Image (tube, rainbow, N blue to C red):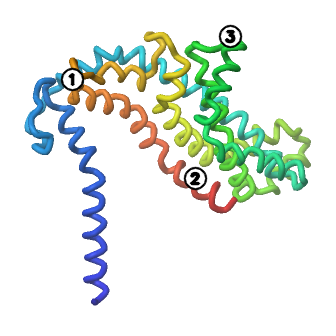
Amino acid sequence: MNPAAKKTMIHVGISILLLVNLLPLIIALSSSFRSIKNMANPLRLFNEFTMESYRAAFTRMHFPQALLNSLLLTVISVVVVVLFTSMAAYPIARLNNRLSKFLYLFFLSGLVVPSQMVIIPIVQTMQGLHISGSQYTPILMFITCSIPFSSFLYTGFIKSSVPLEVEESALIDGAGLLRRFWQIVFPLLLPVTVSVVITQGVWIWNDYFFNMIFITKTAESPLPLAMLGFLGDQTNPTAWNVLFAACFLCALPLLAIFAFLQKFFIGGLTVGSVKG
């Protein structure tokens, strides 16, 4: 087989695989633009174009309030994770002793144990501390579960992409430790910071498990919990068109943020994790 034919076959295979993976998303998008009662064959793509399902989803899930709740949970969690893990990764990456190696492995060990395995003692502990059932209780879990992977990215990026000579020059000029970190090192961490914001922000934004366990008030529900109202039962069938519309409404903010930050995301993720 000549190289041109082989290359063409590879491109055709990749295109088919891409189409197969995109087909469920295309079907969902097509259904979201149908009227609520239009339950025709979903494979008949875009046979109707109306915003009725989007209007129903926007109203029934109280989208502005749910969006605000999701923003609060995500922004607070991500900001705390970025601040704490970047500061923790800095000495781990710069110090070459047993303590720093132990702390690095200690943080990485958090990737081994799924949080769902220890959720019962965690709930019992929070109930004992009288902090369960609050809108902000899931933030504690989000921060805790985000620390291991974020520390791993920051440590690898600092070791491989932040030159020590820059800090030595600042030290000669009389800059203290905090000033060297915040004014010299932290601005250089922009690519890996964007990677942490996107990877952890997407997970926190889409999380259903912790929100379902700790949030008890409807007015405090973020977007994943607000979508529960579209799931039906035996007497009240699921309004699939409205549910698909709600899914796309929830995804739009993430798509906009990722489109703006994707160039930093790819660079920070590859450099920080591969070379570290």
Q: Disc 2 versus disc 1: distance between alpha carbons?
A: 42 Å
Comparing 220 with 262, the one in front is 220
Where residue 26 appears, as percent x and y from the top left, is 23, 45
Residue on which disc 1 sits = 237
Residue on which disc 3 sits = 130
Q: Residue furthest front?
A: 234
Q: Disc 2 versus disc 3: distance between alpha carbons?
A: 38 Å
Q: Residue at x 61, y 24 (%)?
A: 139
Where residue 166 appears, as percent x and y from the top left, is 80, 53
Which of label 2 and label 3 is nearer to you? 3
Q: Residue at x 21, y 42 (%)?
A: 27
* Amino acid type at image mark 1: Pro
Comparing 26 with 131, the one in front is 131
Where residue 52 appears, as percent x and y from the top left, is 17, 22
Q: Name the image quarter holding residue 42.
A: top left
- Upstream in sequence: badge 2 or badge 3: 3
Residue on which disc 2 sits = 269
Q: Disc 1 versus disc 3: distance between alpha carbons?
A: 38 Å
Label 3 crowd bin: few (<14), some (14–19), many (20+), radius 10 Å: few
Helix, strand or loop under label 3 = loop
